[in-house]
Amino acid sequence: PPPPPPPQRPRAAPTAAAATPPSSTPAPPTWCGAVGRCDAGLLAVDISFEAPNHGGLASSRYALEAMGRWPELAPLLLVLKELLCQRGLNEPFTGGLSSYSLLLLAMTALLQAGVDPLEAPLPRPQHHTPLGEAAPGAEPPAAQ
């Protein structure tokens, strides 16, 4: 008999998008059909919106700027993320390391190893408590 057809991957449907209420606990990822993921070729997608107690968009800009200053940062992060993924340590809500934490860890390791950025170092990232106040030691917000 002929072999059974391969299992169908879930497909992302634009009409299936919905906003969820804010939460201090991140939701598990929604899986979309794609390639480049260590488990069956699926890719996790996390969409972030800027809010008073969440700096997702600012974090993305910070990460892009950091990778522009350290050309070796992107390949280093890809290798580290793959190693974490292979060991199930890539999801923070299951005890793994978040991408942003990994970025800060890699930047610190490069600086400690004497790898200087191409331009002046980035300012310290602004971290906020769950209530939106600046954490101790964080830079004050820029005047707008």
Image: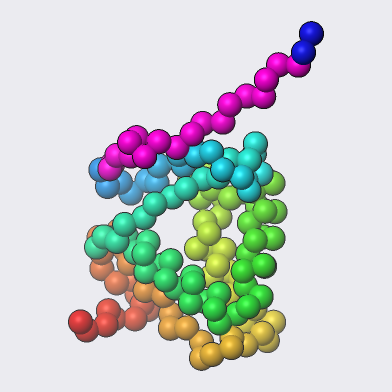
Q: Is residue 28 above or below residue 62?
A: above
Q: Is residue 108 above or below residue 41?
A: below
From the viewer's perspective, tell me whether residue 72 is left or right of residue 138.
Answer: right
Q: Residue at x 65, y 36 (%)?
A: 40
Q: Residue at x 43, y 66 (%)?
A: 60
Instruction: Give the quadrant of residue 130.
Output: bottom left
Query: Residue 37 location, x and y as percent?
Result: 62, 45
Q: Is residue 108 visible?
A: no
Query: Residue 1 location, x and y as percent?
Result: 79, 8
Looking at this rendering, what residue extends furthest in the front direction? 2
Query: Residue 93 location, x and y as percent?
Result: 48, 46
Q: Residue at x 30, y 46 (%)?
A: 23
From the viewer's perspective, tell me whether residue 83 is left or right of residue 22.
Answer: right
Q: Is residue 22 magenta?
A: no
Q: Residue at x 42, y 71 (%)?
A: 61
Query: Residue 41 location, x and y as percent?
Result: 63, 40
Q: Nearer the viewer, residue 127 or 17?
A: 17
* Magenta stretch, main secondary structure class: loop
From the viewer's perspective, tell me whether residue 89 is left or right of residue 98.
Answer: right
Q: Is residue 16 visible?
A: yes
Q: Which span is picked out in magenta?
A: 3-20
Q: Is residue 2 above or below residue 46?
A: above
